[in-house]
Image (cartoon, rainbow, N blue to C red):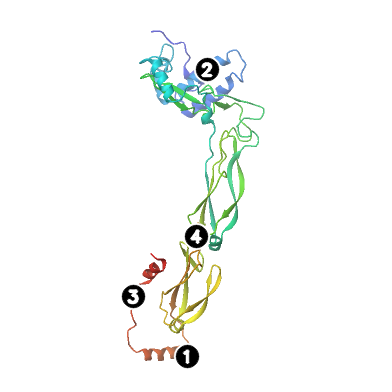
Amino acid sequence: MATSSKRDYYEVLGVARSASADDIKKAYRKLARQYHPDLNKEADAETRFKEINEAYEVLSDNDKRTMYDRFGHQAVGGAGGYDPFGGAGFGGDIFSSIFDAFMNQGGRTGGTSQSALRGSDLRYHLQVSFEEAIFGTEKEISFQRPEPCGTCHGDGAEPGTDLVKCSKCNGQGEIRTRAPIFNMLTVVTCDQCGGSGKMVAVPCHTCKGEGRVRNTRKVKVNVPPGVDTGLQLRLRGEGEAGMRGGSAGDLLVAISVREHELFQRNGNDIILELPLNVAQAALGTELKVPTVGGEEMLEIPPGTQHETIFRLRGKGAPSLRGQGRGDQLIVTRIVVPTKLSERQRELLGELAEEWGSEPIDKRDGGFFSKLKDAFGM
């Protein structure tokens, strides 16, 4: 059996056999930049570069590394070993052409379709007052987001230096592997360059090669009338900047409405509790009641009971779809006094004698059944 003259892959990368995946990756990046033919003009630079790339391709793959540790170069395509890109197998050229056509790979230059990456969406929590939710408002918000680096203009390379061809995919942006059975071709995006086919040789001093920096962004948010807690507004293009010319993500603004001291909301209807004393409820009265649009006169008929519901049409929240407004529902609360003057106690005593021990009429239904009727539920 012929013996391989290849150098030990661990020795090529200058790492111990127990090196972690991160250690191997760091060593590879350092050596790849050092011996890249576009940067190093020494006579053996290209040979060293190919050797470094071959070592990394094996040691960065857990399965290949395990086979190499056990059986050496021949187990992973070394001298005299299996060539994963060869035509060996079941009619290689025929199956190759079939699968190439099926995968639409014929004539593809590679790399360009995966190079542009859209930026991620961002989320922002915006709290508004009850009135702002009803009438709408404009808010200026401030947040941080990744934006294209102004020094390198987003490519991650130090000004005055060029991007270099990715060593792992040879500038194609994708890795092609042909399986021995049926000679099937698989194509995956290169995990080293992210599909761009290019690598940063000298990282930008501002963004450290990322191509993006975090900046504070201020934008104005138009909150439409009628919003409620849970609504989400989408601001197109205000999210994270894209990579390698990709479009920016969106900013998702989640709305929450602060509680009001008087009003509650149910859909587009607004609920107000109205306290009445015993005399007002029994004799009837006319009162000014607050609404979100100002005070309105409300007539309370004699004999009004506790939890009676009155409806003011069109005094609720506007519909987000522009289809009118809800109503304001006024729920009465009969308030029993806890402190009485002597005169009040005397009058109530006379009233009690007048009423005697006759039972109070029972009301049909409870408060929740009235609310269901009021809401049409």
Per the image, label 3 sits on a secondary structure element best described as loop
Nearest the eye: 221 or 214: 221
The local crowd at label 4, few if under 14, some if 14 to 19, many if 20 or more residues have their Cα within 10 Å, is: few
Nearest the eye: 358 or 135: 135
**Circle on res. 323:** 4
Answer with mark 4 or mark 2, whichever residue precedes in sequence. 2
The image position of residue 366, as x and y in percent, is: 36, 72
- In the rendered image, the vertical position of residue 217 relative to residue 243, given as above or below: below
Answer with mark 1 or mark 4, whichever residue precedes in sequence. 4
Answer with mark 2 or mark 1, whichever residue precedes in sequence. 2
Residue type at mark 2 is: Lys
The local crowd at label 2, few if under 14, some if 14 to 19, many if 20 or more residues have their Cα within 10 Å, is: some
Q: Nearer the viewer, mark 4 or mark 2?
A: 4
Q: What is the distance, in whole Å, between disc 1 and disc 3 at their CAs?
A: 34 Å
Q: Quadrant of residue 222?
A: bottom right
Residue at the spot 40% in from the left edge and 68% down from the top edge? 371
- In the rendered image, the vertical position of residue 46 relative to residue 150, given as above or below: above
Residue indicated by mark 2: 50
Residue at the spot 55% in from the left edge and 56% down from the top edge? 224
**Circle on res. 364:** 3
Q: Quadrant of residue 365?
A: bottom left
Q: What is the distance, in whole Å, between disc 1 and disc 4 at their CAs?
A: 54 Å
Q: What is the distance, in whole Å, between disc 4 and disc 3 at their CAs?
A: 34 Å
Per the image, label 1 sits on a secondary structure element best described as helix
